[in-house]
Image: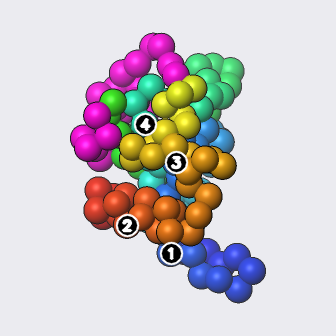
Amino acid sequence: MSTYNGITITQMINFGQPRVGDPKYAAFSDEKWTTQWCMVHHKDIVPHNPGEAWPLDFYYTSTEIYEDKDPSIYKNCAKGGDPTCADQWWTFSIDDHLNYMDKPMGSDGATSCVVKAKFVKKCKKYCL
């Protein structure tokens, strides 16, 4: 749990988040926010960057919720890059980064509070 501008943050859900640190940073992040997830849609390219191979050593900071190509199929994955989830792919797609939960992300879709609230509600169903 953390506080930001006077608001207590108890959980965090990211959509298509890149790797942002090494395993030590991931452990720190997991300690600060014990309830956090990263939703990854099918072959989304962004969560695979930057790379995890030496010397980069980037690592996922939260539990992955994998959304299959069929947006009604979700899987709660092992931490750190589950080879049965997004890490199963060797080819990637920018289009998969722009669509989550069968909705377009960005200025054409997920900018309204109503749409975002529906995303969070649906994600919580699979994350909790």
Q: Secondary structure at mark 4?
A: strand
Query: Which one is earlier in the sequence, the residue at label 4 or at label 3?
Result: 3
Residue occupied by mark 3: 15
Mark 1 or 2, nearer chain start: 1
Amino acid type, label 3: Phe
Marks 4 and 2 sit apart, C-alpha to C-alpha, by 17 Å
**Which element type, helix, strand or loop, lies under badge 1?**
loop
How far apart marks 1 and 2 lie (CA) works out to 15 Å
Magenta-tinted stretch: 70-93
- Residue 16, percent from left and from top: 54, 41
| Front disc: 1 or 2 | 2
Q: Main secondary structure of the magenta part?
A: loop
According to the picture, the residue beneath numbered tag 2 turns out to be 121
Q: What residue is pinned by disc 1?
A: 10
**Split into 4 quadrants, where in the image is the N terminus?**
bottom right
**What kind of residue is marked 2?**
Lys
Residue behind mark 4:
41
